[in-house]
């Protein structure tokens, strides 16, 4: 499908959200991703990006991209792309989704740009399942790196921001570990985890050490 870029939003110093117009026939589940077909001097390649907005936004959807050193796709999207540019994309794909499970609590655990699909899930649940209590545990290097910070602060969910390279009086300091997670373990809750592979694997191991069952855990790994 062809996607037309209609807005570029600066989220942090190295992260932007790209808003695309959405055809009425295009449907997706919260948490799914698109595969973009791109081209640079090295040739054609494909890159997957999670949709960071809820399916309830009928006229547009967004992807959120963090700049990566020598990143072919991020270089195109963050440095070369202009409003009204069109992109070829495939999708949606993915099983890291909220499927209207009947639960009382959902705990989201994210690092960096791994927050993108979780943002989609959070907004979908707030509108369609407001009775579910949501907790967000979000790890970043510094406060300036927290994507959607002001936006999340206004939401009626429980929020825990953790910083690994900066001490801040308003946030937790250090990495997310068992001692932090144990305060947010809920009976029969669902746990959505997204971020770099080592982060995701660590969070899964920590949850299991706290007697969370594998079937309660959903993961997405960002390479």
Image: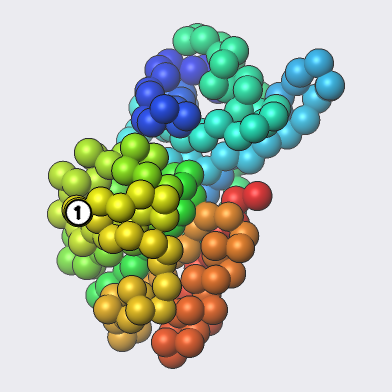
User: In the rendered image, which quarter is residue 60 located in?
Assistant: top left
| Residue, far right | 42
Tell me the residue at 49%/84% (across/down). 208
Q: Is residue 166 placed above or below 193 in the rendered structure?
A: above
Q: Residue at x 55, y 64 (%)?
A: 200
User: Can you give x and y, in whole percent of width and height, for residue 136 in the image?
Assistant: 31, 60
The answer to which of 186 and 161 lies nearer the viewer is 161
Residue ID for mark 1: 169
Q: Of 188 and 154, which appears nearest the observer?
A: 154
Residue 200: tell me if it is visible: yes
Against 18, residue 99 (above or below) is below
Is residue 99 visible in the rendered image? The answer is: no
Closest to the observer, 93 or 83 = 83
Please tell me whether residue 89 is drawn above or below residue 202 in the rendered image. Answer: above
Question: As rendered, which of 170 and 1 lies closer to the eye?
Answer: 170
Residue 158 relative to residue 196: left or right:
left
Report x, y in % for residue 56: 32, 41
Rendering quarter of residue 6: top left
188 to 133, vertically: above or below: below
Count up the numbered dots.
1
Residue 10: name its quadrant.
top left
Quadrant of the snapshot with the N terminus: top right
Residue at x 45%, y 79% (from the top left corner): 207
Estimate the x, y position of residue 204 in percent, counting from the top left: 52, 74
Q: How is the image coloured?
A: rainbow
Image side of residue 28 versus residue 156, left or right: right
Q: In the displayed structure, does residue 39 sit left or right of residue 75?
A: right
Q: Is disc 1 placed on a helix, strand or loop?
A: loop
Q: Identify the residue at image location x=19%, y=53%.
A: 170
């Amino acid at each position: 499908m062809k996607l037309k870029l209609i807005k570029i939003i600066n989220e942090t110093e190295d992260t932007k959200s790209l808003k695309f117009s959405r055809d009425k026939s295009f449907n997706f589940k919260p948490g799914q991703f698109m595969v973009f077909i791109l081209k640079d001097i090295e040739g054609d390649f494909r890159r997957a990006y999670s949709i960071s907005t809820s399916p309830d936004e009928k006229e547009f959807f967004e992807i959120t991209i963090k700049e990566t050193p020598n990143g072919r796709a991020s270089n195109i999207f963050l440095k070369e792309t202009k409003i009204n540019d069109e992109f070829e994309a495939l999708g949606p794909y993915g099983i890291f989704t909220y499927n209207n499970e009947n639960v009382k609590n959902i705990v989201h655990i994210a690092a960096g740009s791994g927050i993108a699909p979780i943002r989609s899930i959070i907004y979908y649940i707030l509108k369609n399942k407001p009775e579910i209590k949501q907790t967000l545990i979000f790890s970043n290097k510094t406060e300036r790196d927290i994507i959607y910070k002001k936006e999340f602060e206004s939401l009626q969910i429980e929020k825990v921001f953790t910083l690994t390279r900066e001490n801040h009086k308003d946030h937790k300091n250090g990495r997310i570990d068992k001692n932090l997670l144990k305060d947010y373990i809920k009976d029969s809750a669902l746990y959505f985890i997204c971020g770099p592979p080592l982060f995701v694997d660590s969070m899964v191991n920590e949850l299991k050490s706290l007697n969370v069952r594998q079937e309660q855990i959903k993961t997405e790994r960002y390479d």
